[in-house]
Image (cartoon, rainbow, N blue to C red):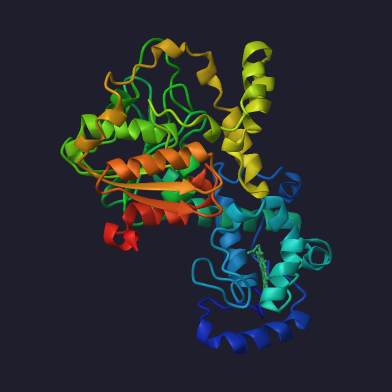
């Protein structure tokens, strides 16, 4: 696609060195560049009325390509993606920190946003220059959003290998480099890792999978072991039995990762425990807030709708408002575990907390300061008992740190321990 009219704001490689010159130019051209640079982009107008996708849903590659073209012509004079702020903010991660509807409104009517929206007003105070109204129609805005989403979460399965173990567990592997394996928590699925997976995919080979009875994996129809499932995933995804792995677990997934490291210790070089929950840990009564009543009631008498409502209301699944719809959808589509007989879960016989002294991998623990106090006390216990353990507190973090703090998590995975210690 070639533009047929020159676009006043077209700049392919903006650098901060020229920032003040561009700032001037942008303010000036704002008045003359009222016609959007959309020549050459042919989009279905019906897109304007199509519902917004999930932040973490599959990416439409063709639409994102059209968005990339539009971004280049209409936005790149003021915004980079991952290259730092220019005249406006760096848009890397914007689809994770704002709702997609908010972004659409910001592109469509920056003036109205300035009048009514406190986030937009805060940004204006910081950047001083008004965000440009590029007069784009709904279909083009939708294409831009698809492009921004792809920049944040990566192209998805089209770019990775997806398969199933013989036992029916669905896995995904992408990227080249040291192997990182991601184990999600209960009532979630591997989409919880999308932002992190994308941040790791450039220099790591990332294996993620859906636990049994979650996501695209088969339901448990008898006794099963999460440790055995994980071992089968590694095998099916082509990770050699003696290849070293970095193992990352979220919540109960951290418990599974710990069980795995105790059974197959030699191959795990680093164990990253995110908002950990470990079998056999008994927190002080005061460390567990009384929030489970409605869920218990729904499990006893309610249908799946009521159970879903009670689940998404738990503080465990609380994230900033712009991320909440995506998390709620993930939790609601992963309630099948409640139909499985708990007696079928077959964890290893030995209690992991009694074997911590045997652990060989280095351990990094991430805890959000807004998570349950019980998570912090478990993290403190692990730090006391495991010589190599480093505990990192995330001041404004809750339980779902992979969604809210993927960059901190990447650091915990890749940085040398000596750096994390400081
Ligand atoms: C003239 C420079 C300029 C152009 C061109 C421009 N923007 Fe902006 N944009 C800004 C500024 C400056 C802000 C910060 C808010 C403000 O000061 O009004 C901003 C804010 C934003 C935000 C909110 C960022 C955040 O962190 O929440 C988004 C999203 C955005 N712009 C998208 C776009 C897109 C997409 C385009 C192209 C269609 C575009 N902008 C074109 C200057 C620009």
Q: Nearer the viewer, residue 76 or 414?
A: 414
Residue 316 falls left or right of residue 414:
right
Q: Quadrant of the C terminus?
A: bottom left
Q: Is residue 108 above or below residue 329?
A: below
The part of the image, by quadrant, that contains residue 350 is top left
Instruction: Return the x and y of residue 203 as percentages of the image width and height.
Output: 32, 56
Q: Is residue 243 visible?
A: yes
Q: Is residue 122 above or below residue 279?
A: below
Residue 329 falls left or right of residue 169:
right
Q: Is residue 351 above or below residue 45?
A: above
Instruction: Return the x and y of residue 157 as percentages of the image width and height.
Output: 44, 41
Q: Is residue 383 above or below residue 24?
A: above
Residue 209 falls left or right of residue 34:
left
So how many labels did they put on this image? Answer: 0
Q: Is residue 247 visible?
A: no
The part of the image, by quadrant, that contains residue 57 is top right
The part of the image, by quadrant, that contains residue 136 is bottom right
Q: Quadrant of the N terminus?
A: bottom right
Instruction: Return the x and y of residue 347 as percentages of the image width and height.
Output: 33, 20
* Image point (17%, 38%), residue name: 266
Instruction: Return the x and y of residue 18 as percentages of the image width and height.
Output: 54, 87
If the picture is divided into quarters, which one holds ligand 1?
Answer: bottom right
* Image point (40%, 42%), residue name: 379
* Image point (47%, 27%), residue name: 216
């Amino acid at each position: 696609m070639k533009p047929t009219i020159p676009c006043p704001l077209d700049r392919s490689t903006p650098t901060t060195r020229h920032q003040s010159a561009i700032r001037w130019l942008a303010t000036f051209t704002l008045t003359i560049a009222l016609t959007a640079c959309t020549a050459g982009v042919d989009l279905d107008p019906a897109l304007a009325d199509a519902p917004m996708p999930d932040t973490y849903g599959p990416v439409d590659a063709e639409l994102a390509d059209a968005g990339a073209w539009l971004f280049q012509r209409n936005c790149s004079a003021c915004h980079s993606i991952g290259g730092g702020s220019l005249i406006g903010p760096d848009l890397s991660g914007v689809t994770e920190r704002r709702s997609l509807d908010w972004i659409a409104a910001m592109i469509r009517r920056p003036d109205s946003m300035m009048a009514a929206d406190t986030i937009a007003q805060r940004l204006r105070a910081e950047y001083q220059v008004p965000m440009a109204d590029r007069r784009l129609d709904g279909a083009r805005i939708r294409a831009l959003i698809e492009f921004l989403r792809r920049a944040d979460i990566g192209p998805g399965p089209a770019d990775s290998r997806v398969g199933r173990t013989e036992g029916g567990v669905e896995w995904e592997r992408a990227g080249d480099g040291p192997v990182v394996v991601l184990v999600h928590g209960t009532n979630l699925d591997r989409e919880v890792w999308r932002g992190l997976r994308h941040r790791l995919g450039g220099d790591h080979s990332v294996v993620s999978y859906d636990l049994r009875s979650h996501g695209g994996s088969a339901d448990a129809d008898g006794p099963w072991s999460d440790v055995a499932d994980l071992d089968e995933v590694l095998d099916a995804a082509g990770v050699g039995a003696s290849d070293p792995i970095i193992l990352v677990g979220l919540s109960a997934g951290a418990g599974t990762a710990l069980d795995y490291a105790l059974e197959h210790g030699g191959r795990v070089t680093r164990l990253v425990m995110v908002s950990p929950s470990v079998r056999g840990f008994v927190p002080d009564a005061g460390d567990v807030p009384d929030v489970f009543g409605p869920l218990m009631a729904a499990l006893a008498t309610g249908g799946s709708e009521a159970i879903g409502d009670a689940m998404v209301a738990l503080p465990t699944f609380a994230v900033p408002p712009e991320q909440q719809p995506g998390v709620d959808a993930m939790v609601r589509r992963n309630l099948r575990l409640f139909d499985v007989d708990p007696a079928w879960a077959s964890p290893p016989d030995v209690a992991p907390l009694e074997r911590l002294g045997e652990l060989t991998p280095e351990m990094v623990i991430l805890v959000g300061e807004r998570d349950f106090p019980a998570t912090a006390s478990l993290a403190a216990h692990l730090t006391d008992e495991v010589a190599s353990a480093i505990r990192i507190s995330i001041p404004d973090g809750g339980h779902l740190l992979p969604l809210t703090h993927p960059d901190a998590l990447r650091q915990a995975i890749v940085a040398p321990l000596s750096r994390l210690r400081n």
